[in-house]
Image (cartoon, rainbow, N blue to C red):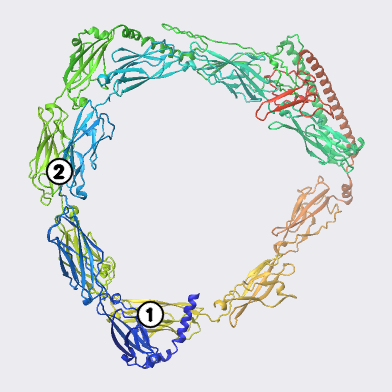
Amino acid sequence: MARGLSAYTRCVKWRFGCGQNWHLLFFLFYVTSMVSGHIRYSIPEEMKKGSLIGNVAQDLGLDLRRLRSGRARIVTGESIQYTELKTDKGILVVKERIDREQLCGDVTPCSFSFEVILENPMELHQITVEITDINDHSPSFKRDSILFDISENANAGARFPLTSAEDPDVGVNGLREYFLSENDNFVLKQNSNADGKKYAEMVLQKPLDRETNPHLSLKLIAVDGGTPQRSGTVNIDITVLDINDNAPVFNQSVYKATVMENSPRDTYVTTVNATDADVGSNSVVTYYFSDLNSVLRDLFMIDEKTGVISITGPVDYEKDKKYELRIQAKDQGGFTDSSQVVIEVIDVNDNAPTLSVMSFTSPVSEDSPAGTTIGIINVKDLDSGENGQVNCRIEQNAPFNIKSNLRNYYTLVTDTVLDRERVSEYNITVVATDAGMPPLSTKKTFHLKVSDVNDNAPVFPQSVYNAFISENNSPGVSVVTLRAKDPDENQNSRISYILEDANIGASPVSEYVSINAESGVIHAVRSFDYEQIKQLVFVVKAQDGGSPPLSSNVSVKIMIQDQNDNPPQVLYPVQTGGSVVAEMVPRSADVGYLVTKVVAVDVDSGQNAWLSYKLQKATDRALFEVGLQNGEIRTIRQVTDKDAVKQRLTVIVEDNGQPSRSATVIVNVAVADSFPEVLSEFTDFPHDKEYNDNLTFYLVLALAVVSFLFITCLVVIISVKIYRWRQSRVLYHSSLPVIPYYPPRYSDTLGTGTLPHVYNYEVCRTTDSRRSDCKFGGAGSQNVLIMDPSSTGTMQRIQSEKSILDEPDSPLEFFFVESYFRISVVFGTLLDIFSCFSFTMARRISSYTRCVKWRFGCGQNWHLLFFFFYVTSMVSGHIRYSIPEEMKKGSLIGNVAQDLGLDLRRLRSGRARIVTGESIQYTELKTDKGILVVKERIDREQLCGDVTPCSFSFEVILENPMELHQITVEITDINDHSPSFKRDKIHFDISESANAGARFSLTSAEDPDVGVNGLREYFLTENDNFVLKQNSNADGKKYAEMVLQKPLDRETNPHLSLKLIAVDGGTPQRSGTVNIDITVLDINDNAPVFNQSVYKATVMENSPRDTYVTTVNATDADFGSNSVVTYYFSDLNSVLRDLFMINEKTGVISITGSVDYEKHKKYELRIDAKDQGGLSDSSKVVIEVIDVNDNAPTLSVMSFTSPVSEDSPAGTTIGIINVKDLDSGENGQVNCRIEKNAHFKIKSNLRNYYTLVTDTVLDRERVSEYNITVVATDAGMPPLSTKKTFHLKVSDVNDNAPVFPQSVYNAFISENNSPGVSVVTLRAKDPDENQNARISYILEDANIGASPVSEYVSINAESGVIHAVRSFDYEQIKQLVFVVKAQDGGSPPLSSNVSVKIMIQDQNDNPPQVLYPVQTGGSLVAEMVPRSADVGYLVTKVVAVDVDSGQNAWLSYKLQKATDRALFEVGLQNGEIRTIRQVTDKDAVKQRLTVIVEDNGQPSRSATVIVNVAVADSFPEVLSEFTDFPHDKEYNDNLTFYLVLALAVVSFLFITCLVVIISVKIYRWRQSRVLYHSSLPVIPYYPPRYSDTLGTGTLPHVYNYEVCRTTDSRRSDCKFGGAGSQNVLIMDPSSTGTMQRIQSEKSILDEPDSPLEVS
């Protein structure tokens, strides 16, 4: 706001300081004429500040008092005011430094104008000050130096425009002439433009020579005509451009070098060097081989830039001892020079011996004897002498030996007996080394496999396999995997796993486990029971598939692991279901009193049998506790008289298995001192009819169930005893008495578990199949399993004891049956196999048979062959044949039998054959005719290249005895190839400046033929410029060169096409042709030439940037880069440089700045065209400017007032504007107007001055701001205009009172509201602003009832929010009406009122009130209904009211409960209770109805009323019904007594029977213990309230044990004491031999005749 406030302050000062005489001034504008004058002064530039310009008062005829009273001042539209008016002296002085060049540039004369204004009356005087020039600037060049690149072939007379100097001074002080420093090549020529400006050109008078003087440095001096004279200097640097006028020259005509044979790739040979006197690209020399055949092209490479020759292929001394290469050096203009390189090869031992395998046998059997021949090798070395002498050896220390029995032939034999299991494969490396220096060697690796013989049996990594399996496993589960290893391979190592025949008890082992013959995985055949059997021990045999087969055995021991599959069994207290009191606790019992002991057992073993006791529920948990380990129930506090007599405890017994199993027992405890007290407490039950009926029913049911169980138990026990007695008579004939034990209610369904006990099975498995065949036999016999219960009564065995199955008196015995087979193989006529697995051995026998046949079929002549190697000498011979190439297949070469003196029978019997080391066998021996014929096409060029003579050799081998004859076939050449060039055409780029005698090497032709058939000479087609010169290399090869005899002219003939013909000397003669294309390269020998000397163009003033002006064009007769012309302005001052631009490539001139007709009406430009060689031409461009109305009026604000008060009268002045237009004539005539139809107008009272005034009264509330746009338009065509927008703000006056949008505000609030809650918000609006629009809300004083309105509501003065002061109650007050005033902050303030009406809304906060029937609490019958009442009989009416209003008071009646809902109904709206059917005699007298009354609020509230209705005809009947309680109490008591007595008698008989059976069982158990000498202890039975002082829980009372465990081992050591007593548990093995129970059976411990109780 600081800047705005400052501006506003200045504005106010202007209004009161400068505008005090406006009314008088305007009056004079209308009634008087204006006084004006014009004076002119002339002064030099650069006058000091304060220097006198002129006496204005004197020149205008004014006195000093008029200047002061008229407030004379200078008015100018420029940004800088150069002059100052001293009103006290009336003089005009210099205020700012005046620089003519900065003010006017080169415009003459130079002046500036301004006005002097006086007031009272207004006078306007124009003053013009002219500025004259002084010589204060020296001529200067735009650049420090001028650069020229001029070709040395530039012709004399060539012109080179120079950059002009600039001198800001004008007239005589401006630029006068130029001077050039002395030199031999250039003179200076001076010229003048049409505007008088001078420029200079350099003219070449003597040609340039780059080789003599590549650089020239000159000076150009410009001087002016002022006094003193000033000058400027610029350096001219001339670079002489080179042309290609020199050919490359080698520094040696012949280069000699040596290279080692077989030097690696990129080996350096030598470097050739040629220099060119030219520079730049003309001196760049490229090197290449001018004529190389295909062989040399693959051997050597030359770097085209450095001339380094290196090796790219193998250099072989045996092929070539010396190489001659022809090198060409060529520059960019096509000039060349040639030289020769002679390379001598130094021989090295570079041919390693070669190994050829004549025969090799693999695999060889491991039982082969020492000295067995496995291979024959042929060794050759292409070198001769010592380098060709070869020695063979075996590299590794292997069991093999190598022998030489014939020249260049070696045999590879075994040195010892082989063992495949130790080494199955051998890599035999044979090394052949020659005698050269350094020696070379060749290695050949033979991969020998040793075939297998079945000499190893399978071996198990363990002698015994121990495995564990949890009981209750799924049949078929994998138990353990056996792995045997056989070091043999294939069929000999194929292992089959066989389960040895044996018995576990009376059953074969195959009934317990099975084994997969291939994988060795042992599976459980059945589900095991740890309590019946604890481990399985059997033998598994691993047998291989050899012939004969070998095998080995291993023992397998499978331990059955116990699982927690039996829940604990509670022995005491016995849960009979009929006892109400089990234990009694005297009220004098102290803390820790032993109430009873819960005794339980678990037939599992280990931690699965560790039991814990917990109190699950109790009538009083603070009175009793249960021992966690011993199950003792003790008191934990003193018993008091307040404790209830009847205490019910629920004890849960859990084992320690995962997951744990549990059993629950309920213990009833009576807290009393005498039994009668207990009896009275437990028999004093409610004597209502329903309870007695239920008790009687349950007593009768219990008596029936106990009786049925008792009879059923007797029948089942007798039946089982008879059945077992009969079986024992038939099956057991032992002299030892057996006391069998039969579980009650045992139902044998012929087996449980996975396999029936009446079956045994035999599994036959094959070695190559996964199928199994099962044979089922008859039922097995029964057995007796004698268990050792020396632990806790479970079937877990003591770790240190021996299995009972190992004892001689065990009824279970293991026996092993071994079965084996033999396989005998007889080779010759028959192969017999005897085995139960005969079909599985077929593949193995077949494979073995093939192996034997090979050995006897394929190797039958090896012994004879080796025998002749050792005992006979070799016969050998050598013959040579010569044949031409390209003979047909089958053509005769020679008669080998005749030439070697052999008959045909010898060839056939000796199995004569050709042995060659080449990949292609060109010849074939016909042993039936004894002749040698062509087998494959023979191409001499492919076989030998250019080597002569060409031949190949091979050997003919005969056996019995061995003869070796070498045959050499020489191939003679035929003329089957024409001379050919490597390329289709030869291309030359030759500069037209090439001198006569220049040589150009041509590509040589190649002819694969040799001798007279090879290349003979070349011919060149006729032409005017070149002749052909033929030469020969040292090796006799011919090559040709073109020699230039007449200079080339590109402008006359830019292209030449010739032909080079090569012919050979064969018959018929053959030839080859190649095209020679010559492109004549251009040199820069022509300067550009403009097609016009003067170009004329016109351009519109103020044309936009990039406007096209004209195009200049210059052409150059040269070609390529030499004809590229660039255009540029040769000499432009700074003004023109910013106005125009020329495209240096196209010559298009365009506008880059603003073209102003008022400044310049015409422009003259000098254009230069220059080529790449520095040659140039110049032309002139004259541009005329067409004038347009391009200056828009300018608006200057002299004064502007904002804001203005809205109560200002019409005609108030708000601004003064000055308008100017730089154009003249009609273009400078300006008219001002206001753009929009605003409440303002503009007036003109003085030339170029306008006033902006109000036209009407302003209203800020209607329009608070105005954007007044003043438009000044000139009279030009087209007219130009300028807009100026004035942003006027209207200040506010408090002329509007606040206004509410509503006359009355209605609001609603629910009763029971929170105090302070917002009810309604009032909003008043005031169109004024700031403080005038700031509204305050006031609550008008009034009373509601006897209390002021402020006790009910309050209002926020700022926001207008009305709040409730208190909580309202609809039942007390239903609405509030009051007045609120809104008042603004103006001065004086204005206000308005509004009425507010707040309605209180009812809530459902009162439940219905039942008026009838009245609920007294003591009434049994309220209404009476006669039995003759018909449908719709009105019984009574429930009357209720609700103090709420509206729907909250709407009541509805519903029947919630009723004795007989089909008899009564309640009216939903009126509450009338009526009958809905006819009353009958069967309806109960006493009817109880519960009616609920609900209102309709949200949420609804309700009330409940109970209506007692008596269905009777008289009151006495009603009274007797409601007072006649159960009259059969005595009868029910007697019935209950007899039922209890009967139940006690039957239970006594049942318990007596159980005691007798248990006694018999104990007696038999003692007898069996004497007879069987078993070591299994008895699980003792503890009578009720038995207290064991040695231990409780799952551990036996006669045992203690100590467990020692280490922190780093999973093993446990258990120590056991001796048994206190022994017992024999005789199991019924009629099932599978496990202890799996029938699903429907009850635990054996529940039977009365069992000496053990096991769950």
Horizontal arrangement in the rendering, residue 292 relative to residue 794 (left or right): left
Numbered label attached to residue 1646: none
Q: Secondary structure at mark 2?
A: strand
Q: Nearer the viewer, residue 480 or 418?
A: 418
Residue 199 image point, x, y percent: 19, 68
User: Which quadrant holds residue 1062?
Assistant: top left
Which of the 4 image quarters holds residue 1566?
Answer: top right
Name the residue at 12% across, 52% down. 1051
Q: Is residue 324 left or right of residue 1197?
A: left
Give the side of residue 1354 with respect to residue 127, left or right: right
In-front residue for pair 1057/97? 97
- Could you tell me how far apart the alpha carbons at marks 1 and 2 are, in whole angstroms? 79 Å
- The answer to whether residue 1096 is seen in the rendering is no
Across and down, in percent, residue 1365 comes to 70, 69
Q: Position of residue 1228 (x, y in %)?
A: 30, 80
**Viewer can see residue 560:** yes
* As drawn, 533 above or below 195: above
Q: Quadrant of the C terminus?
A: top right
Say which residue label 2 marks.
1077
Secondary structure at badge 1 equals: strand
- To which quarter of the image does residue 627 belong? top right
For the residues carrying marks 1 and 2, which lies nearer the camera in this image?
Answer: 2
Total marks drawn? 2
Q: Residue 1196 — which label?
A: 1
CB within 8 Å, label 1 to label 2: no
Q: Earlier in the sequence, mark 1 or mark 2?
A: 2
User: x%, y% of residue 504?
Assistant: 65, 15
Q: Amino acid at mark 1?
A: Ser
Count neighbours of disc 1 (C-alpha within 10 A) and say few if under 14, some if 14 to 19, many if 20 or more: few
Q: Residues within 10 Å of mark 2 (few under 14, many from 20)?
A: some
- Dot 2 amino acid type: Asp
